[in-house]
Image (cartoon, rainbow, N blue to C red):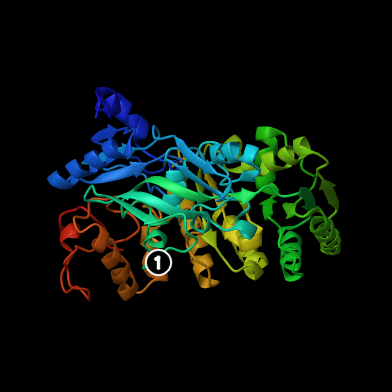
């Protein structure tokens, strides 16, 4: 690596001590910024040779502590690998490096009549490598799916420093789905140095509707009615009163006065289809209590409607000095019941919770507000945050939809999976990374030593005894 690609100064190292989940902070021992696959592979080979743990990081916008560094390890930052190598209009594919910003893929494809569908709220800054690691979704995942539905191939640097190709240009590569194993593995199986992604044709027409409701129950009922009618919008997003208050303070989005909840509903596709679907959506919203419907008449109004939703996470900083961004999934039909339970949790604990989420597929993003300067406030917020995850599990959901497990939710994995389940997952990790150096300490509450025989342990785990892991 050139000198400019290696950071050792303690002050500069602190720039990288956390990702978007600032609640956890660790200063890395060393940061490297490779610019080529060869440089990155060389760094990983050196780590493997000396048994040094490494963690990959893109733009650092993750919200589960997935890119939290190791104090005794190397942080491999891919932000300088920003080349869009190819846009293949005829194949509806693009080949990009991991540091390429999500929205830049769409900007490159738009002149060709295409765009990249996965669109996290942070799409103006989040990177493709991080999206791949966390299997990110976004507002339009209801119709178009997650990153895993749009990645056809990847060049991967294994934890040994080898460069291998997974998948490719073909729609379904033969053999085991190793690409599907790597996408969403949170950097525990290696580092992607390129991704071949699917491009989607720009729709003939897009209609964006803002609907104001008095309660989240009404908005949830409208959501279920729309999906139940057979209409599949590109997106259905919900924000409650507290989230609306934050967005208004931050970006002045001018959402309906007096709304206890709003839905942002977007329809796209052939013009005739969109017109028919819009009439159905408008009718169902009115039937379920919408007191104001506002259709964007041009791209500027559409951007303003989305601005409130896209800014929601950061906007909460206007009404609270600290907050936890949670991420869980429930069946869509359980929305009213779970939202009421969250409101009860908030009321009984005195901890405010703002709700903003992908209503169409039940992916919740509760924002738990607190002031860390007040003794015990952080602990109370964490307790409420954990109780929300318990609600998701008890209603047949999951502890994460798109933010990943990372360090933030590892303690909740045994609530979803049996010991045998966790052992099986870790055996897959061990097959890729027998040295346990690729983003160790993430996802699993107690790491399994590769080579250990699966089954119940009779004694304390060696890593627990050494103080290197917690047992939950």
Outermost residue toward the front? 90
What is the x, y in percent for residue 179? 39, 59
Figure quadrant of residue 456: bottom left
Image position, residue 312 (x, y; %): 62, 42
Closer to the camera, 257 or 178? 178
Q: Which residue is mark 1?
A: 174
Res. 344 image quadrant: bottom right
Q: Say if 362 sits above or below 441 in the image.
A: below
The residue depicted at 46 percent of the width and 44 percent of the height is: 95
Q: Is residue 461 left or right of residue 66?
A: left
Is 427 displayed left or right of 301 in the figure? left
Q: How many marks?
A: 1
**Residue 376 visible here:** no
Position of residue 307 relative to residue 362, above or below, is above
Q: Is residue 367 left or right of residue 162?
A: right
Residue 391, percent across and down?
53, 66
> What residue appears at the point 44 percent right and 34 percent down from the top-left corner?
82
Q: Looking at the image, which is closer to me, 469 or 149?
A: 149
| Residue 178 in the image, given as x and y percentages of width and height | 36, 62
For residue 269, say whether it is visible.
Answer: yes
Q: Give neighbour class at mark 1: few <14, some 14-19, many 20+ (Cα, 10 Å).
A: few
In the shown orientation, is residue 225 left or right of residue 369? right
Dot 1: element: loop
Give the residue displayed 20% in from the left and 41% down from the top: 72
Quarter occupied by the C terminus: bottom left
| Relative to 273, residue 14 above or below | above
Residue lying at the far left in this picture: please name it: 50
Of 433 and 442, nearer the camera is: 433
Residue 260, compared with residue 451, is above or below; it is above
Quadrant (top left, top right, bottom left, bottom right) of the N terminus: top left
């Amino acid at each position: 690596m050139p000198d400019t690609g290696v950071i050792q100064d303690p002050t500069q190292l602190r720039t990288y001590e956390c990702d978007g989940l600032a609640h956890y902070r660790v200063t890395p021992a060393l940061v490297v910024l490779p610019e080529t696959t060869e440089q990155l592979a060389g760094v990983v080979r050196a780590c493997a040779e000396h048994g040094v743990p490494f963690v990959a990081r893109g733009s650092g916008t993750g919200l589960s502590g997935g890119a939290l560094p190791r104090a005794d390890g190397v942080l491999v930052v891919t932000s300088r690998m920003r080349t869009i190598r190819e846009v293949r209009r005829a194949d509806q594919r693009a080949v990009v490096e991991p540091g390429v910003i999500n929205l830049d893929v769409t900007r490159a494809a738009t002149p060709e009549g295409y765009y990249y569908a996965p669109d996290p709220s942070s799409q103006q800054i989040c990177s493709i490598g991080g999206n791949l690691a966390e299997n990110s979704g976004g507002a339009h995942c209801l119709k178009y799916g997650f990153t895993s539905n749009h990645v056809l191939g990847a060049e991967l640097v294994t934890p040994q420093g080898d460069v291998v190709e997974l998948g490719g240009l073909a729609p379904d590569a033969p053999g085991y789905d190793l690409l599907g194993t790597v996408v969403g593995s949170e950097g525990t199986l290696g580092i992607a140095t390129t991704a071949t992604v699917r491009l989607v044709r720009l729709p003939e027409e897009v209609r964006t509707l803002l609907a104001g409701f008095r309660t989240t129950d009404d908005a949830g009922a409208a959501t279920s009615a729309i999906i139940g009618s057979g209409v599949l919008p590109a997106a259905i997003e919900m924000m409650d009163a507290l989230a609306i208050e934050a967005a208004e303070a931050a970006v002045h989005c001018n959402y309906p006065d007096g709304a206890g909840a709003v839905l942002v509903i977007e329809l796209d596709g052939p013009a005739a289809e969109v017109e028919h679907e819009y009439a159905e959506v408008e009718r169902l919203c009115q039937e379920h209590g919408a007191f104001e419907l506002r259709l964007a008449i041009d791209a500027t109004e559409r951007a303003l409607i989305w601005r409130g939703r896209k800014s929601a996470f950061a906007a909460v900083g206007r009404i609270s000095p600290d907050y936890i961004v949670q991420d869980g999934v429930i069946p869509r039909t359980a929305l009213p019941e779970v939202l009421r339970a969250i409101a009860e949790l908030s009321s009984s604990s005195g901890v405010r919770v703002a709700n903003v989420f992908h209503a169409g597929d039940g992916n919740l993003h509760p924002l738990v507000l607190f002031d860390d300067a007040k003794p015990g406030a952080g602990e109370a917020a964490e307790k409420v945050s954990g109780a929300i995850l318990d609600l998701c599990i008890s209603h047949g959901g999951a502890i994460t939809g798109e933010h990943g497990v990372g360090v933030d939710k590892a303690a909740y994995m045994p609530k979803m999976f049996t010991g045998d389940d966790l052992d099986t997952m870790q055996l897959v990790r061990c097959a890729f990374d027998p040295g346990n150096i690729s983003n160790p300490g993430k996802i699993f509450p107690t790491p399994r030593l590769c080579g250990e025989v699966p089954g119940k342990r009779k004694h304390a785990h060696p890593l627990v005894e050494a103080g290197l892991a917690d047992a939950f």
